[in-house]
Amino acid sequence: MEASYRIVHSIPGRLRLIIPALADKTDYLHIEQMFSALKGVKLVRIEPIIKSMVVEYESKVVGIKVILRYISLFFRQTQFDPLDRFMVQVRPDIRKDFLRSLCTGFLILIAYLRKGVSPTPNVFEYGAVISTAYTVLSHGENKFRHPDVLTGMVSMFSLGTNNILQVAMVTWAVNALEIFHDMRRSQRLL
């Protein structure tokens, strides 16, 4: 299993990492003291807002690989997010939005495949619509100004309630595009 951190910069004696698992750990003072107790480590500073850890060390006493191994082992214990290995540079809230959107897309696909089987709405169609609504309304700060919410309202009025699965699909597609945009923007900020 890979480490759940990203090296921002590394020069002999100083290392800065972005560690998304710091969102789950809140006892920063304890973590700083624990890593400072390692032989050769002079200073450890955590910046919780950006989820970063700075380690100043004596490069003649301890190597960077040893420090990274300790950090990897410590933060692997709290790694429960299945997307950590692939999306370590993305904020945890955006990863949750991505996972929700992925599940919603899967439900919409199943609902479309099942639609040909029965002309009446089935559980999958209702589930896809409810999941789409939850996915769209659960991310962002100003809910009613998001492009996906506006798309959902406009497509509902233009396509009508008889085509609710198409409304859900269009709304989900805009939501997925918005999440990808948020992912790219969060990567540029790091």
Image (cartoon, rainbow, N blue to C red):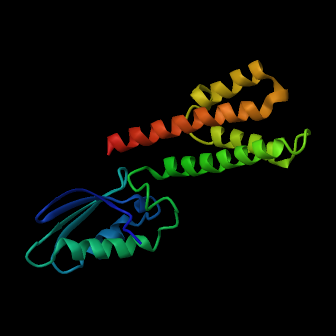
**Vertical side of 150 occupied by 106: above or below:** below
Left-right relation of 172 to 98: right
Q: Residue at x 61, y 35 (%)?
A: 173
Which image quarter: residue 53? bottom left
Q: Residue at x 37, y 76 (%)?
A: 73
- Percent position of residue 168, x then y: 72, 35
- Percent position of residue 100, x then y: 61, 49
The reply to whether residue 36 is in sight is no
Q: Residue furthest top?
A: 158
Q: Residue furthest front?
A: 116
Left-right relation of 91 to 16: right
Q: Residue furthest left?
A: 60
- Percent position of residue 70, x then y: 30, 76
**Vertical side of 39 occupied by 116: above or below:** above
Which image quarter: residue 166? top right
The reply to whether residue 172 is in sight is yes
Tell me the quarter of the image containing the N terminus: bottom left
- Percent position of residue 177, x then y: 53, 35
